[in-house]
Image (spheres, rainbow, N blue to C red):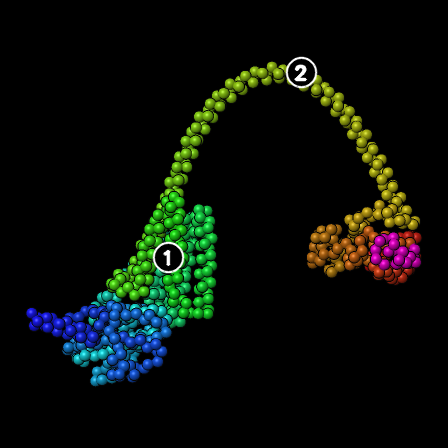
Amino acid sequence: MRVRLFLLFFVLFFRLGGAQAQQPVVLTDQLQEHIFSFGQIEQYEDPGGKLSFEQISTPAWSAKFSASKKSTPQTLHLQSAYWFRIRIDQKEVTKNPYLLEFFDQTIDDIEVWAPKNGGGYTHIQLGDKHDFASRSIRHKNFEVRLDNTQAGVHTWYFRVRSAQIADVIVVLRSVDYFIGYALNEYFYFGIFYGMIVVFSFYNLIMFIAIRQKQYLYYVLYNLSVGLYEMSTDGIAYHYLWPSWPEWNQIAYAFALYAVGVFALLFTRQLLYVKAKAPLLNKLILVIIGLRTAFLLYAYFFDRALLNYKFIEAIPLATAFFTGVYIYRRGYQPARFFVLGYSFLFLGFLLKFLIMLGFSSLNFGVVSYYSLSFCFVLEMIFLSLAIGDKVRLLKKKKDKTQQKMFRQMTINARLKDTLNTELEKKVEERTREVYHKSLIIEKKNEELERANLLLQQQAEEISRMNVLLEQDNFELQHSVEKVTRDRVMSADVDFEEFSRIYPDKDSCYDFLARLKWQHGYACKKCGNDHYYPGHISLSRRCSKCGYEESVTSYTIFHNTRIPINKAFYMIYLVYSTKGKISSHKLSELLTIRQSTCWTFGTRIKKVMDERRRELKKAGRNDWSQLVLE
């Protein structure tokens, strides 16, 4: 019994002790694919990132490597450099070519020290911060060719640094297997992105046809999802911007921002959030504003913040909660919306748990592409939500049309009933009207005779009115003429003067007749044809377009005195032969003395210049001073 216990203890001790040594991977021609995990990959964290390969490969540092405690090691501390080491036991020279592949396409910098035949190492640089054209194998992942011309156990070293948490998935593959795997992967990528393009194109056509914003936001949301997936898969770096490594480092952040924003805008439009949940609508707008501010701050001030991908859970959670809330309020199209976002949340939750260190959830390709699968399911269910909304709207429209048809039938019956009753009443009323019409005819005959008499009287009154109008016109003309002659020949006050020129329109009319009494002639080109100008009584040349106002080329041009008072001032200065003082003018016209002095001086200057012409004119013909 003691011998058996000793043997069991010895076996367990031997196995546990053996677990501490690194396990080399045996390479034979029968091997197609192998993923390094746990004891097959050792790691060492260099917090300062200053160790060189010459230091890390010495026996002193070699003892500091430890076997990975996870199936997939991760670079959790972004400021550190991580060293990884694997061992490949090549029993014999293999016929098939092999390569090592790093499965995570988002790693910024990978330095590889590959063992050479005869000793020494070859230094190779990989990573998405380097130009895509520098890769020896043009593939979205990072590959290193394996030298299979030397037998024995060989140790490989890798130095990994990345601005975001990276999964160090190292895979050993034969070239034949890699070609088939890569072709299949790109084929499935084509299906995935093709679905996005097809869904987007279909909804774009719907937007063009119906002009509903929900289709446009859904198109932009799908394209943002596609761009984000292409950025994280390395497809975008391969095909869209292979020569822009700086943009490739941050493109995923802008694509992820667009996913969240357009998801919220699509939610608002699809579920009528503004009408059904005003508070949630305001919350959505606030989240869009804060998310935009966060992106701008991260881009311009702290690029490290762009690596917080799971901040996008806030807008997506808001959209999901909004869908649940509105669905519980009884809006049926929200059911597929909620179902689609449920799958998306499962994908985000799985990625988040894997990032927190739940390595048991990281079970291969399905978990790695889980978010992509969830995006496909969500895209399908969102399309069903749009279709369900259209279907329910159509159903509601059909019900409304049926209700309208029934109502129209009822209205038709009521119309027939009313028409029958109206016909009876019309017949009765017609008989009554017939009897009354006989009476009305007699009264009409009497009225016609009375109208004839009134018409004769009206004609007589009209003739008398015409004669009175002629007398009034002659009387008015005589009074106006007498008043004007009085103004021109005697001293009158401003009140009496204003009866002839009561406002600026009468003054402008006088100026127009005075200026153009001998015909119009353009001051610029001499043309004698004109059109009415934009200002009252102005004239615009039909040839050159020059517009001449009624005060242009007169003494009133550019004066600030009211035109009727300016008229009266000319009359006063002229009638007193310039002897009236500016103080008197200010008193009579209620205008400042300085203004009266300025304009009075201008009038006197014109009087001096035209002394000879004024001697030949009438005693008080002050209109001679108006024109320049």
Q: Which residue is mark 1?
A: 222
Horizontally, residue 420 falls left or right of residue 316, namely right
Q: Number of labelled discs?
A: 2
Q: Quadrant of the N terminus?
A: bottom left
> In the picture, residue 430 is in which quadrant?
top right
Regarding residue 565, the answer to whether it shows in the image is: yes
Horizontally, residue 574 falls left or right of residue 192, namely right
Tell me if mark 1 has few (under 14), some (14-19) or many (20+) residues whose alpha carbon lies within 10 angstroms of its own: many
Viewer-proximal residue among 258 and 23: 23
Q: Quadrant of the C terminus?
A: bottom right
Viewer-proximal residue among 54 and 266: 54
Magenta span covers which residues?
576-593
Q: Are marks 1 and 2 in contact (CB under 8 Å)?
A: no
Q: CA distance from mark 1 to mark 2?
A: 86 Å
- What amino acid is found at the position of numbered circle 2 in the picture? Lys
Does 39 appear above or below 615? Answer: below
- What amino acid is found at the position of numbered circle 1 in the picture? Asn
Q: Which residue is mark 2?
A: 442
Q: Position of residue 499 (x, y in %)?
A: 84, 45
Tell me if mark 2 has few (under 14), some (14-19) or many (20+) residues whose alpha carbon lies within 10 angstroms of its own: few
Residue beneath the point at 39% across and 60% down: 312
Can you tell which mark lies on residue 118? none
Regarding residue 204, the answer to whether it shows in the image is: no
Is tag 1's residue or tag 2's residue first in the polypeptide sequence? 1
Label 1's element? helix
Viewer-proximal residue among 602 and 494: 494
Residue beneath the point at 49% across and 23% down: 419
Residue beneath the point at 74% across and 24% down: 455
Q: Position of residue 406 (x, y in %)?
A: 41, 31
Label 2's element? helix
Does 230 appear above or below 585? Answer: below
Marks 1 and 2: which is nearer the front?
1
